[in-house]
């Protein structure tokens, strides 16, 4: 009998227990959960979120799962979707650099909503979350064509399905069926990034909802293809070619999801090396905007695909700012930072920033095969000639990870914003609750008392 990838992953998800996962992996998952909750908190008031909530919350009938940032309890699938949209809204969430997937903005909303509905324990929840993220990262590592699919959503739906199926205790066959059902809901492309559309932030949310829905259907007895990945019309033959060996390499021994990087800036990761390079030059030379005649951003073809188009904030200013290397360089020169304030509408439309962004030339280095780095900035000045800086690694990546102090500062910044800003004392309580999540006996009340 041929062993399918769905079957192998189903067995792995079904059989893996909390105590077999290394403490370091569990700690990394808690840090990423805290990071994701924080950026979702700040993103809860981002453009488009009110419209999404109006479309779903009034029809809510079952108060199963909490909307983060002070929202009501809503049906599990609505919570997975809306919390997922908030988590993606500011492009400030974690990224697995090699797999090119944002796992937590899909898996955390889906798995947490399901854990609340089921009154699962913190250990059960954390185990399911880690396994969900692991599936997404491994699937991402196996597809390297970058053909235009949005990897976060097309792989994320399978991870969310796996994590939720784990919580439903469906067994190996049930997880496999959840994968097969998820196959029918795969979607998400980079077109939203190219057009700077607000749909960019809901593609991962749709995957979160679809993954949880897939597990619900599998729980109800819906059968599905057994070869969701390698079948004749499965994922690898219909969407993008994948390497099964990479998915399975070290499965259960090495947790690649623990290598997920946190972001230093609320912007597409393709901008980060350029932001870092520009800020270094500005600080080193005390460069003033009036001294800047123009700049060059030298990037890879992949980076150019996502952030290299001319800066045009007229339709969706926030998304345009997040996906523009021209804006990123200009903002770093003028404001000497790029934080949440710098992706708001007022900053994105600021005349000085827009004018300088138009003087940032994008140069594509065809010899650069990097996805997020390296990136080089050249700034032409009136008084100092041309200043140049190259950054070889993504800030916040494995070579320069975000420290606990930097994470705490990011959490404090984010959770003091959004639709329900928290006081420093409540932020501290929530942070401590997340880091001790495996001590909670009922996830339905995990947020009580914050």
Image: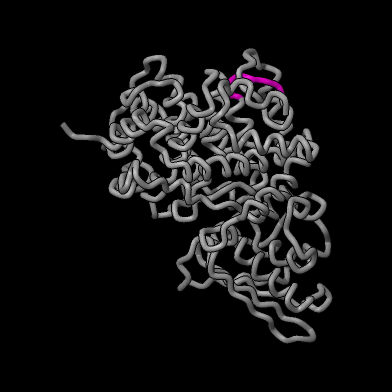
Residue at 58% across, 58% down: 396
In terms of depth relative to the viewer, which is nearer, 147 or 23?
23
What are the residue bounds of the magenta stretch? 72-78
Q: What residue is rendered at 79% in x and 67% in y?
A: 334
**Relative to 248, is 361 above or below?**
below
From the image, which quarter does the N terminus lie in?
Answer: top left
Judging depth in this view, the residue of 360 and 84 nearest the camera is 84
Q: Position of residue 268 (x, y in %)?
A: 61, 54
For residue 243, side relative to residue 135 (left or right): left
Q: Is residue 449 left or right of residue 401?
A: right
Membership of 252 in magenta stretch = no
Q: How many marks?
A: 0
Q: Is residue 186 visible?
A: no
Residue sitting at x 33%, y 34%: 12
Q: How is the image coloured?
A: one colour
Q: Residue, x 39% and y 31% (percent of image)? A: 17
Residue 232 placed where, x, y %? 26, 37
Viewed as shown, does residue 265 lie left or right of 239? right
Is residue 39 left or right of 173 when viewed as pictured? right
Quarter assignment of residue 253: top left
Q: Quadrant of the C terminus?
A: top right
Report whether residue 75 is seen: yes
Image location of residue 353, percent across then percent down = 79, 63
- In the picture shown, does residue 57 fall above or below 381? above
């Amino acid at each position: 009998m041929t062993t399918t990838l769905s079957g192998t992953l189903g067995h792995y998800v079904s059989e893996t227990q909390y105590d077999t996962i290394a403490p370091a992996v569990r700690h990394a998952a808690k840090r990423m959960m805290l990071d994701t909750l924080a950026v979702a908190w700040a993103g809860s008031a981002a453009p488009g979120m009110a419209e999404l909530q109006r479309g779903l919350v009034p029809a809510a009938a079952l108060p199963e799962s909490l909307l983060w940032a002070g929202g009501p309890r809503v049906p599990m699938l609505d919570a997975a979707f809306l919390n997922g949209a908030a988590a993606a809204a500011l492009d400030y969430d974690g990224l697995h650099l090699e797999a090119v997937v944002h796992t937590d903005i899909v898996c955390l909303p889906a798995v947490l909503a399901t854990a609340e509905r089921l009154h699962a324990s913190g250990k059960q929840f954390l185990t399911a979350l880690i396994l969900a993220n692991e599936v997404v990262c491994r699937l991402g590592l196996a597809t390297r064509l970058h053909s235009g699919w949005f990897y976060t959503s097309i792989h994320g739906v399978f991870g969310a399905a796996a994590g939720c199926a784990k919580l439903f205790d469906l067994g190996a066959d049930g997880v496999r069926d959840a994968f097969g059902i998820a196959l029918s809901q795969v979607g998400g492309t980079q077109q939203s990034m190219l057009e700077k559309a607000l749909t960019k932030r809901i593609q991962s949310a749709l995957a979160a909802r679809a993954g949880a829905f897939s597990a619900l259907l599998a729980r109800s007895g819906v059968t599905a293809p057994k070869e969701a990945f390698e079948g004749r019309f499965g994922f690898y033959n219909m969407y993008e070619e994948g390497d099964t060996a990479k998915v399975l390499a070290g499965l259960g021994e090495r947790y690649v999801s623990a290598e997920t990087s946190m972001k230093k800036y609320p912007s597409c990761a393709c901008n980060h090396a350029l932001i870092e390079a520009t800020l270094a030059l500005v600080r080193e030379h005390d460069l003033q905007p009036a001294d800047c005649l123009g700049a060059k951003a030298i990037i890879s073809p992949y980076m150019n695909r996502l952030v290299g188009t001319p800066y045009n904030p007229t339709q969706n200013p926030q998304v345009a700012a997040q996906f523009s290397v021209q804006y990123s360089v200009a903002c770093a020169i003028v404001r000497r930072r790029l934080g949440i304030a710098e992706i708001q509408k007022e900053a994105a439309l600021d005349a000085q920033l827009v004018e300088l962004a138009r003087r940032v030339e994008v140069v594509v280095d065809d010899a650069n095969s990097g996805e997020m780095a390296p990136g080089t900035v050249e700034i032409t000045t009136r008084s100092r000639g041309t200043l140049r800086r190259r950054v070889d690694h993504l800030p916040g990546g494995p070579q320069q990870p975000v420290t606990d102090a930097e994470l705490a500062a990011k959490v404090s910044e984010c959770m003091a914003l959004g639709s329900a800003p928290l006081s420093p004392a409540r932020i501290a309580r929530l942070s401590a609750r997340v880091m001790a999540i495996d001590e909670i006996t009922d996830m339905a009340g995990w947020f009580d008392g914050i």
